[in-house]
Image (cartoon, rainbow, N blue to C red):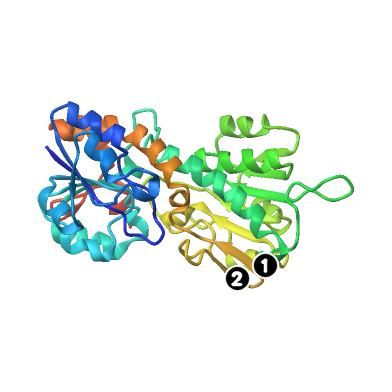
């Protein structure tokens, strides 16, 4: 199969779909692999690194998409990429179509098959291609939140972990999955007082085990509201695979938060779990709503492209190999990842929108 790796065009997105070492695995398996010129540069990989791995370098996106059968990229196709897609393409990337109605309609019009990284699901419920980026996003959420609480960034002027003779900051995390768990771990390690909400008791036990400064609670609506009103930093990390995230925090509750508090919504890719969330980019990552600083970057891991590309490629390679071998529809995890095919919506969560 001809496997193409384009250069990402989303604002300040530095990741690449496959690093040279991963692409070399496909070449050794007998596949043809090509990468767009400079696709790996921001992740620290030159065209020469790909060529040394047996990968061809094509000059531009038109050449790459025109040549490829299987397109492996990181972020959902941007509008300038839509004309390059064909009905015979197999597209493999993050899609987040529940929050992208225009893209959904365009993919349906084109008629291609699109498999979303975030909806590839193993029999035990694991989301193996979402997990590494969720891990990174959770860590960045806590780090970014700590920085945004400083006065020059519009925050309340609080050192998140506190210190002797000064109060600790209070962090509230909605969701104790991979992203929320990572955010809670970083916040707890910084010394903050952390409250985590989740429905799963085993996850709550894991969060509580992080330390005496972590409280883990069931997400009753009134309990969430009380915690948010006392929060310095609110992190949203709610995920329903393939579906739009439910709003767990209303605009009225955000309005009642203390001035200079910070909201970081990792769920923004799926529409956000906080009503006042809207998508932002790394070029303009924050906005202030009712005196509360909001951070809604839709590609948080894109800010650490070398780390993220290495982690993503390690997770991706076995699934790309299955897709390239043919007969991949018999692989249940990949079959569950199909979002659209032949002009129809396939994923159940999208069918319910």
The location of residue 129, given as percent across then percent down, is 36, 38
Judged from the image, the secondary structure of the residue bearing numbered disc 1 is: loop
Marks 2 and 1 sit apart, C-alpha to C-alpha, by: 8 Å
Res. 204 in view:
yes
At 51% from the left and 60% from the top, the residue drawn is: 296
Q: Please tell me which residue lies in front, 93 or 53.
A: 53
Looking at the rendering, in which quadrant would you find the C terminus?
bottom left
Is label 2 in contact with label 1 (beta carbons under 8 Å)? yes
At 66% from the left and 71% from the top, the residue drawn is: 291
Q: Please tell me which residue lies in front, 77 or 203.
A: 77
Judged from the image, the secondary structure of the residue bearing numbered disc 2 is: strand
Of the numbered discs 2 and 1, the one sitting upstream in the chain is 1
At 13% from the left and 29% from the top, the residue drawn is: 30
Asked which quadrant contains residue 225, the reply is bottom right
| Residue picked out by circle 2 | 288
Outermost residue to the bottom? 290
Task: Please indicate whether residue 207 sits to the left or right of residue 170 in the image.
Answer: left
Task: Please indicate whether residue 20 sits to the left or right of residue 245 in the image.
Answer: left
Task: Return the mark for residue 154.
Answer: 1
Nearer the observer: mark 2 or 1; the answer is: 1
Determine crowd level at label 1: few under 14, some 14-19, many 20+ residues with C-alpha closer than 10 A: many
Looking at the rendering, in which quadrant would you find the N terminus?
top left
At 68% from the left and 49% from the top, the residue drawn is: 171
Determine crowd level at label 2: few under 14, some 14-19, many 20+ residues with C-alpha closer than 10 A: some
The location of residue 8, given as percent across then percent down, is 31, 54
């Amino acid at each position: 199969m001809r496997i193409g790796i384009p250069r990402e065009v989303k604002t300040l997105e530095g990741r690449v779909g496959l690093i040279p070492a991963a692409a070399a695995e496909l070449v050794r398996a007998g596949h043809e692999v090509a990468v767009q010129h400079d696709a790996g540069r921001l992740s620290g990989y030159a065209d020469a690194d790909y060529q040394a791995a047996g990968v061809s370098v094509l000059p531009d996106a038109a050449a790459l998409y025109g040549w490829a059968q299987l397109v492996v990229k990181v972020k959902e196709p941007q509008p300038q990429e839509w004309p390059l897609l064909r009905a015979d393409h197999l597209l493999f990337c993050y899609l987040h179509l529940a929050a992208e109605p225009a893209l959904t309609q365009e993919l349906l019009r084109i008629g291609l098959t699109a498999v979303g990284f975030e909806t590839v699901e193993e029999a035990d419920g694991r989301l193996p291609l979402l997990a590494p980026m969720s891990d990174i996003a959770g860590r960045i959420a806590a780090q970014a939140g700590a920085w945004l609480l400083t006065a020059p960034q519009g925050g309340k002027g609080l050192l998140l972990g506190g210190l002797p003779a000064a109060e600790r900051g209070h962090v509230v995390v909605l969701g104790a999955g991979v992203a929320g768990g990572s955010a809670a771990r970083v916040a707890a390690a910084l010394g903050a007082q952390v409250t985590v909400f989740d429905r799963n008791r085993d996850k709550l036990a894991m969060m509580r085990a992080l330390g005496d400064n972590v409280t883990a609670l069931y997400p009753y609506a009134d309990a969430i509201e009380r915690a948010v009103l006392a929060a310095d930093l609110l992190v949203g990390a709610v995920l329903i695979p393939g579906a739009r995230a439910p709003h767990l925090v209303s605009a009225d509750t955000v309005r009642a938060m203390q001035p200079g508090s910070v909201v970081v919504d990792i769920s923004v890719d799926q529409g956000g779990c906080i009503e006042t969330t809207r998508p932002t980019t790394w070029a303009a990552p924050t906005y202030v709503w009712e005196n509360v600083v909001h951070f809604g970057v839709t590609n948080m891991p894109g800010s650490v492209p070398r780390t993220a590309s290495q982690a993503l490629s390690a997770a991706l390679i076995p699934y790309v190999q299955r897709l390239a071998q043919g007969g991949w529809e018999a692989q249940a995890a990949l079959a569950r990842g199909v979002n659209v095919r032949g002009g129809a919506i396939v994923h159940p969560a999208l069918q319910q929108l």
